[in-house]
Image (cartoon, rainbow, N blue to C red):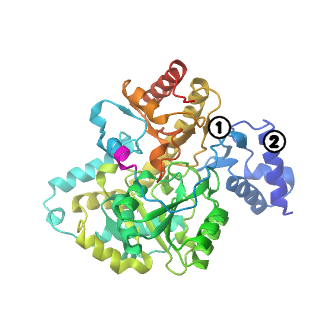
Amino acid sequence: MPQYVDIANVISDRIQKGFYRPGEKLPSMREICTSFSVSLGTAQNAYHFLEENGLVIPIEKTGYFVRQGQLASGHLPNVQPVTQEPVDIKNWHSILELAASSPSDGVLQLGRGMPDVDSSSLKPLLKALSQTGRSTDKRALYYDDISGMKKLREQISRMLIDSGCDIAAEELIITSGCQEALSIAIRAVCEPGDIVAIESPAFHGAIQILQACGVRVLEVPTDPITGISIESLEMILEQWSVKLIQVTPNCNNPLGFIMPEERKRELLNLAKKYNVMILEDDIYGDLSYRYPRPLTIKSMDMDGRVLLCGSFSKTIAPGLRIGWIAPARFFDRVLYMKYTGTGSTSSAAQIAVASFIEDGYYLLHLRKMRAMYHRNLQQTVEWIGESFPTGIRMSQPQGGYILWVEFPKNFNANAFNKSLLQRKIQVVSGSIFSSSERHGHCIRINFGHKLALLENGIRTMGELLKNESFYGS
């Protein structure tokens, strides 16, 4: 057994026995080197091993910490079994109800996947947007290149280096948000009636796009720590002619996991073996609590099998509607679909975002938001522990601001949300994260809000759970 694994096992044992508590800072690399008489490389490998196994989290320029809310495996959400047959998607009415709600309704929206847009770190962006509107430069008034503004594509190309990707600006297409990127990618690869394999639970927006494209869906059991089940997926690929695998391996929505690198490689190798394309959604990847941020599957792709999508909707603001796609071998088809769809994306927003990134403000903003979301997660887990009934299970997000909470099987999340709405609070039922309304006993919570609002929302939920029954027979 490698020496770094022995060291990792010692630290893991101390965590499990409570010697190191959730949220506690672990010994520095130098201290590990001294205590175990090993090299710096061995110490680093030990912590990377612990990180891959979901026990610790690195904080930029600070060190490694025991994962907050580190629970015994029995308290993680269950891996849900699914029917191994393709299905048509039906639950679009619930999505419309969620989409129709707006911040102006006076409802605390703990369900919608929106970032905190009140941060002072966004002031330079607001200034850039204002300057674009007042500028005598009329670029913002013209149609831009269908591929998007070159300056913005160049900035995104540089950013992608952090995720391990070497993608030139000429290989990128700017879209109107990640929704359009996903939609174009799916239509470029699939025809109506084709089969697409997805995680379960999966991002509800992607599920609805799949429905609109007329494809059938196969849900694959997904682990809250390691991601989509490679073993179950291979059984599916052996039985069915799958055209596309759609995944969110980094800071997954809604489970929050970061898929270990080895599992990413296994997924890519499996796709190669069965000649299946992969659509990778990396929209939350920049919000990883891990430093450096995790690699994408695309970074391991040598034959153009992975279409990579991203956006600034979850890291900056959804109203910008700036996303992007690296379509690999489908570039021409995707570009044509962009042209026949929305055409070019808003020039004014592209100009402002490009300047925000180029001037270094985006990285500063990310650093601030990652720290804030991580603190919010720790506090949210604590409040839920104090306010919610026993018997629940929670995900352990490794980035972003989304928490998945699982109640006993007979819990009715839709009824719970309806009662919450009467108190001006909204969550999202887990049923919309499935193509066939599974996960109806789960809810998704956005913990990216101001702490005072968040505490009020969590404690109100706790009171409601004590005083009313949402459990069936």
Query: Which residue is denoted by mark 2 in the rendering?
Result: 14
Left or right position of 449 against 63: left
Q: Amino acid at mark 2?
A: Arg
Q: Is residue 262 above or below residue 96?
A: below
Question: Residue 405: percent from the left, percent from the top?
Answer: 56, 38
Q: Is residue 145 visible?
A: no
Per the image, label 2 sits on a secondary structure element best described as: helix
Quarter where residue 302 is shown: bottom right
Q: Is residue 348 above or below residue 266?
A: above
Q: Is residue 216 visible?
A: yes
Q: Amino acid at mark 1?
A: Gly
Which residue is pictured at 23% across the width and 68% down the height?
343
Question: Residue 457: percent from the left, percent from the top?
Answer: 45, 27
In the image shown, does 122 or 435 lie closer to the viewer?
435
Q: Name the quadrant of the C terminus.
A: top right
Query: Which residue is denoted by mark 1 in the rendering?
Result: 69
Which residue is pictured at 48% across the width and 66% down the height?
196
Q: First in sequence, mark 2 or 1: give its number.
A: 2
Q: Is residue 460 above or below residue 315?
A: above
Segment tinted magenta in the rendering: 91-95
Question: Residue 469: percent from the left, percent from the top?
Answer: 52, 23
In the image shown, does 71 or 123 lie closer to the viewer?
71
